[in-house]
Image (spheres, rainbow, N blue to C red):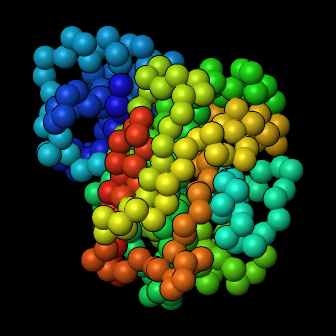
């Protein structure tokens, strides 16, 4: 099932995408029981949502809603750096035994179809196509073997990076958190539709040209490893997002370099999920 968060008539809501263009408004049906997607996940109501969708009689048109990031305000957005061998090589960095982690804030995200904003402070805005994992059942010190049962679903992510601010110090936080530079969407595909360990292909396109492509068997630290490692450091909670890393081909390491500019269209596609599409505009 495909779950989306959105605004309808100015009011935040969420629902299930039915077919290509129909939306079942779950907030209207479940009310305080589950007012948003994160609470639906936390209260283990995904099966109930599936039942409601099967019996749906009244729906909205997708064109009548304004999409929000899949989880608009995650408790945690944990991003993984240097998690594909070709990206490690192109950056000239050393492979580390443990995952390299950094955090994003919710205000740095935009939805599918919205404009990613190039800040006035820099024109070195780069794309990073990634697979996002949305946590379902929370936990601490989750084993790799049990990790698949802690996943609610998957989505596409563009970990947009302002490169000169990222490398200005040894810490990446500034370059990874400019306002409205990261795309998250268009929806969450529930984990029951993607088998544990299923091979997924990730592709990034800029103005129709393929810039990055990789499969999940190329990850240095697998999804189960990431869940186990991160949950050792901090408890994972329903609705938390793990952004699993980008492959080689980033614009900053090309010759000549390629940075996103106003009017560009960037697409992140995961074959088992769909396509996240954003335009670029000046802030």
At x 59%, y 77%, the residue is: 253
27 up-or-down from 92: above or below? above
Q: Pick the residue in front: 265 or 101.
A: 265
Q: Is residue 113 left or right of residue 43?
A: left
Q: How many numbered markers are drawn?
A: 0
Quadrant into which the C terminus falls:
bottom left
At x 49%, y 54%, the residue is: 213
Q: Pick the residue in front: 10 or 150.
A: 150
48 up-or-down from 135: above or below? above
Q: Is residue 275 left or right of residue 169?
A: left
List x then y, in percent, for residue 93.
78, 69
User: In which quarter of the view is residue 29 placed?
Assistant: top left
List x then y, in percent, for residue 3.
36, 33
Residue at the far right in the pictured view: 97
252 up-or-down from 202: above or below? below
Q: Pick the residue in front: 86 or 6.
A: 86
At x 55%, y 44%, the residue is: 215
User: In which quarter of the view is residue 32 placed?
Assistant: top left
List x then y, in percent, for residue 88.
72, 63
Quadrant into which the N terminus falls:
top left
User: In which quarter of the view is residue 211 placed?
Assistant: bottom left
Q: Is residue 244 left or right of residue 109?
A: right
List x then y, in percent, for residue 233.
82, 42
Q: Is residue 69 visible?
A: no
């Amino acid at each position: 099932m495909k779950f989306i968060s959105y605004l309808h008539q100015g009011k935040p809501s969420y629902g299930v995408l039915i077919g290509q263009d129909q939306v079942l408004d779950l907030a209207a049906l479940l009310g305080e029981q589950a007012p948003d997607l994160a609470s639906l996940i936390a209260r283990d109501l995904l099966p109930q949502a599936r039942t409601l969708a099967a019996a749906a009689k009244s729906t909205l048109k997708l064109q009548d809603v304004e999409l929000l990031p899949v989880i608009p305000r995650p408790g945690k957005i944990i991003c993984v750096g240097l998690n594909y061998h070709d990206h490690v090589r192109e950056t000239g960095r050393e492979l580390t035994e443990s995952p390299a982690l950094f955090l994003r804030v919710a205000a740095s995200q935009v939805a599918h179809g919205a404009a990613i904003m190039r800040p006035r402070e820099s024109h070195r805005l780069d794309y990073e196509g990634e697979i996002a994992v949305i946590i379902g059942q929370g936990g601490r010190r989750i084993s790799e073997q049990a990790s698949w049962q802690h996943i609610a679903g998957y989505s596409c992510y563009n970990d947009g990076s302002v490169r000169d601010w990222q490398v200005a110090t040894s810490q990446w936080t500034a370059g990874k958190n400019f306002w409205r530079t990261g795309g998250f969407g268009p929806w969450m595909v529930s984990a029951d539709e993607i088998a544990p360990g299923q091979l997924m292909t990730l592709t990034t396109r800029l103005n129709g040209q393929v810039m990055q492509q990789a499969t999940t068997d190329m990850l240095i630290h697998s999804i189960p490893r990431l869940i186990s490692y991160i949950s050792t450091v901090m408890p994972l909670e329903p609705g938390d997002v793990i952004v699993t890393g980008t492959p080689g081909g980033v614009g900053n390491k090309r010759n000549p370099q390629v940075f996103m500019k106003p009017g560009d269209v960037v697409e992140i596609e995961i074959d088992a999920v769909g396509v996240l599409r954003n335009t670029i505009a000046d802030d």
